[in-house]
Amino acid sequence: MSSPLAPSGNGPMTDPAPLSLCAREPHVPADRLVAEMVPPPRFDSVRFSTYIPDPNQPSQTEAVRVLEGFAAGLDSGAAAGSGKRRLFGFGKAPKKAPAGPRGVYLDGGYGVGKTHLLASLWHATPAEPALKAFGTFVELTNLVGALGFQQTVRTLSGHRLLCIDEFELDDPGDTVLVSTLLGKLVDAGVALAATSNTLPGKLGEGRFAAADFLREIQGLSARFRALRIDGEDYRHRGLPEAPPPYSDEQVTGAAHATEGASLDAFSPLLEHLARVHPSRYGALTDGIRAVCLTGVRPVPDQSTALRLVVLADRLYDREVPVLASGLPFDQLFSDEMLNGGYRKKYFRAISRLTALARDAGKLVDAR
């Protein structure tokens, strides 16, 4: 394809240079970190009314009914708490805590719509967005890492609802940290809702994890009502087949031809991620419309792999296509990693990067 001529007609117009993630070192204020704790864009429009229960699974209809009632019960205009501090009432004393559990846990297998329901609860809760938060377990631990424990408690204590998707049951240290945090927030009157992943070693042993979740949060278990959501497990549990990678030339050409695309070599990007706190990975991708990577290779160690998982989550949340050369994404992690304690995270990263790689094919086709 011939290049367009410059206005003068003297020669080809040079494509603007693509962006580089490695050139970015975002500094994100605390208020933005909390303000960004909302359902990801792919769940912007979900509501209880858009969740279509399976008529053969009455637990799905019951879950919607209970969650709608839970959301309505949060319409108190004030967080429940000790009454010693103003949380929501703008000078008024907090109202008495509603009776019953202040937390709900959505217990079900893959593909039954737990995240859809969790996001619908967030949308249905009668409070302005600044008074409710939605994030994954990893995002919550990253928030604590960025702000510190006490500041996180102070910041979230004024919320009416905290939704935690994919509560991690594979890291005892982080589980204790978050359980302690949730205890402080419940004491301040914050309502909680959560889903969780499956414990390592139990990926093929059924679909439900309520007993594991309630055991791991220990003293908080009495505050949660578990909602079991039955349904068909329609997602493929194995590793998805990744599309074949493109050549360096194809990736580079697409990066130059795509407005808002970034272009980075894979190894330097992994090194750069080590210098940026994971809580800032969302800001790292601000304004990026496509990520182009050359020389994809297996990640060298577990710490690097876990950082890449977080970046994959942020790109997937934002639906940013990823075009790459080198090895396909299903060869990113070693057999040891895929058989270890964090394998659920790695399966998720492969699945999400593979989906984004399929989306990126149109960048090459359009040239």
Image (tube, rainbow, N blue to C red):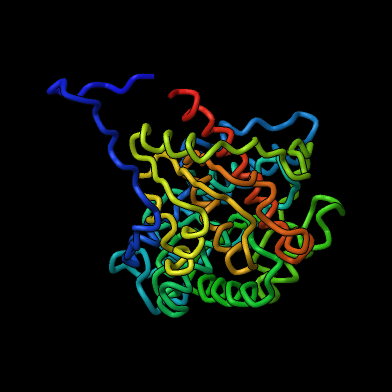
Above or below, 130 against 232 in this view is below
Going 50% across and 49% down the picture, which residue do you hit?
Answer: 122
Image position of 147 (left or right of 336) = left
Quarter of the C terminus within the rendering: top left
Furthest-right residue in view? 205
- Report x, y in % for residue 195: 65, 55
Furthest-front residue in view? 10
The quadrant in which residue 277 appears is bottom left
- Report x, y in % for residue 199: 77, 62
- Report x, y in % for residue 230: 78, 42
Q: Is residue 99 visible?
A: no
Above or below, 289 against 162 in this view is above
Q: Nearer the viewer, residue 96 or 121?
A: 121
Going 80% across and 30% down the picture, which residue do you hit?
Answer: 56
Quarter of the N terminus within the rendering: top left
Going 83% across and 59% down the picture, which residue do you hit?
Answer: 202
Q: Nearer the viewer, residue 218 or 267?
A: 267
Total label count?
0
- Report x, y in % for residue 235: 74, 38
Furthest-left residue in view? 8
Above or below, 336 against 324 in this view is below
Image position of 128 (left or right of 10) = right
Above or below, 249 against 135 in this view is above
Q: Is residue 308 visible?
A: yes
Going 85% across and 51% down the picture, which residue do you hit?
Answer: 206
Q: Nearer the viewer, residue 236 or 16?
A: 16
Image position of 110 (left or right of 79) = right
